[in-house]
Amino acid sequence: MGLTLVRRLRLWLLLAVMSVGLCGWPVHAGAGEPGANAVPPKSPWSNLIIQAEALGLPTKFLRVIPPDFLTLEFEDLHAFAAEYHPQEHRMLLNLALSFNGAGGTLKPLAKMTHREVSTLFHEFLHAYMDYIGSQLDEKVLSPEVLRLRAFAEERQRCWYQVVTITPVVQRRGATEIRFLSEREAWEALNESWAVFVGWAIWSQLELGRASKQSRPAYANDQWLQRLRKADKDGDLIGYYEPEDQAERQVTRKRYLAPSHRLTPQELRVLLEVLFGASGGQAQRASLVMEQHRLAPKEAMPCRS
């Protein structure tokens, strides 16, 4: 038996150690009363973005998430490396992602393995989708974020409402058609997109992209070759947790079939809105993927 270690702190507090390490304490400008004209240190969330930029990673979508939106927790997880709970805006990470494994603060990105960084970005995509989906006031969201939200809602209805799954993960050729609930379809979309974001980050780090190089990773031929292979191998697939209790006793997750993997249309929007790719760059990347995807005949057609 062992004690489960959980640390529940706001994200800005959890990242405070990194904030001090990167920016130091406030700097005072000139003489005067104590505290006058003090230059405040950058917020811990800003410092996380600085760390990501230092590694040459995309940060555009991270900047959309308010620093106080998330609650970050560490726990000695066994089944999964991380979990996100949208109802509570809560991110649960394995202790391995904490500094010295102590569960107090997030480990600096430069000290993480490539897989750990990709896991973190996978979860940040969930937080991003949670945030933009929970915003009732559209004025606080930019036009391109609203574009992505509208696109996600359409894909939920036309591509993820009726899906092909692999009941037995080891037998990817044996598939079944499933009609998903609204929640299941939204989760399948979220996981598919998060799998791609995590894969994109991992591939970029594996290729050793330096932050000072002029071209982003998604414009690099080696990255595009990896994308072609991942698409061909059916790696960019999502999953969902079935609502039916009897089915949940059989399996906690249902994985989409390779035929229901991320589409070129989705890739283009994600690269443009999340990563800041130009229309031409996103189009070039999407063209390395198989273009025609056969949806189940029961599914409604997608507009784009």
Image (cartoon, rainbow, N blue to C red):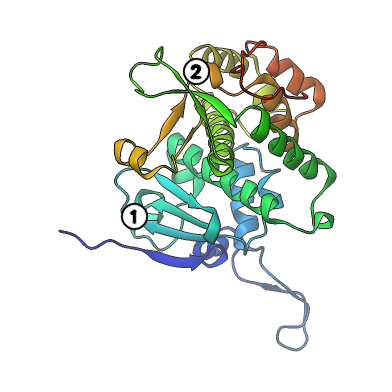
Query: Percent x, y for residue 160?
Result: 60, 30
Give the alpha-carbon distance from disc 1 to disc 2, as whole Å. Answer: 36 Å
The residue shown at (66%, 67%) is: 41
The residue shown at (44%, 45%) is: 111
Q: Which residue extends farthest bottom?
A: 33
Q: Which residue is mark 1?
A: 101
Residue 176 visible? The answer is yes
User: For the residue labelled by badge 1, is the local secondary structure a helix, a strand or a loop?
Assistant: helix
Q: Amino acid at mark 2?
A: Pro
Residue 19 vs residue 240, the one in the foreground? 240
User: For the residue labelled by badge 2, is the local secondary structure a helix, a strand or a loop?
Assistant: helix
Q: Which residue is mark 2?
A: 258
How many residues crowd around disc 2 within 10 Å: few (fewer than 14), some, or many (20 or more)? Answer: many
Tell me which numbered mark, 1 or 2, is placed earlier along the sequence: 1
The residue shown at (63%, 14%) is: 293
The image quadrant where one finds the N terminus is: bottom left
Residue 274 visible? The answer is no
How many residues crowd around disc 1 within 10 Å: few (fewer than 14), some, or many (20 or more)? Answer: some
Q: Amino acid at mark 1?
A: Gly
